[in-house]
Image (tube, helix red, strand yellow):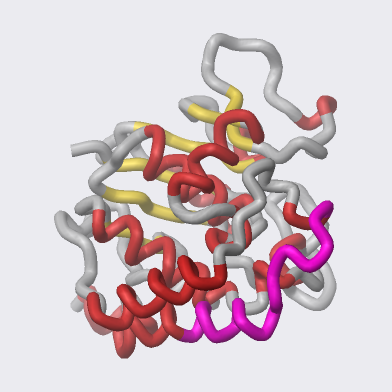
Amino acid sequence: MTRVLILGSGPDVTACRAWPRAPFDAIVAINNAWQVRPDWDHAIFPEDFPDTRKPPPCPRPRVQAAEFVPAQNAFGGVIYTGGTMAFTAGYWALHALRPRLIAYFGCDMTYAPSGQTHFYGTGTPDPLRDDPTLQSLEGKSARLMIHAARQGCAVVNLSDGPSRLICPRARPDTLPDRPAPHDADLAALADAREAALGYMVASGRYWEAPGACDPAELRKVDALWLAAVGPLKRAAFTAEDDR
């Protein structure tokens, strides 16, 4: 069973430096997160990521648009998967690694109004930009979780703080062995609505295609995915659960 840890740049991500490599089979580092621990397996970053911030030359894979856009297209295209790297990394991992579990850490997409927003200092809150594909980070999170479940893959969040990811909370020593359930009928309605709308930009560069999607219609699709996970969207690990 392949378990994938996806690391982002949230301030709390440095806590994983103390974690043993087990139980993870692969570590995917988004953008600057390759700096967090040295045993990452895949570094993933967008086309505009500065060369000066990329990891030094080594044989481990760098995943860029040529690899992750086809993966997103296999799951409906960037407009539906969401144009930010947390979701990009998740869909790429589903497509390329075929895992049984994806565990996110440091990918909560919440930002303090001032002070440190990333483990390396202050960064741009990319997922909060005015973008039609990112109107509901929760809806996009639900979509990813359901598409993963269809492959037999559970998706969890190892953070214990506020998060825009709605997948269940877990810890490295309490990882689930099966996906959380969802409403298959509502998910099928979301699939059908996406197919009817037909929002696909094969290059992934949807911002270069004016009128590629109707934001109001995307909100309706996001709402369907969110409804399909129902009360599970509030699932979380708490201190009480640990006792």
Residue 66 visible, this orientation:
yes
Is 72 located above or below residue 64 in the figure? below
Q: Main secondary structure of the magenta part?
A: helix
Instruction: Please identify the quarter of the rendering in which residue 112 is found.
Output: bottom right
Give the side of residue 82 with respect to residue 47, left or right: left
Is 57 located above or below residue 142 in the figure? above
Give the side of residue 234 with respect to residue 86, left or right: left
The residue located at (56%, 49%) in the rendering is 88
Give the side of residue 211 with respect to residue 163, left or right: right
Q: Position of residue 175 (x, y in %)?
A: 23, 56
Residue 123 visible, this orientation:
no
Picture quarter with the N terminus: top left
Picture quarter with the C terminus: bottom left
Front-most of residues 229 and 3: 229
Q: Position of residue 148 (x, y in %)?
A: 32, 56
The residue located at (23%, 69%) in the rendering is 180
Q: Position of residue 42 (x, y in %)?
A: 51, 29
Q: Position of residue 124 (x, y in %)?
A: 82, 59
The residue located at (22%, 62%) in the rendering is 179
What residue span does the magenta drawing correspond to?
208-223
Front-most of residues 31 and 13: 31
Give the side of residue 40 with respect to residue 116, left or right: left
Whether 210 is among the magenta residues is yes
Whether 37 is among the magenta residues is no
Instruction: Please identify the quarter of the rendering in which residue 46 is found.
Output: top right
Instruction: Please identify the quarter of the rendering in which residue 178 is found.
Output: bottom left
Exactly how many numbered labels are in the figure? 0
Front-most of residues 62 and 159: 62
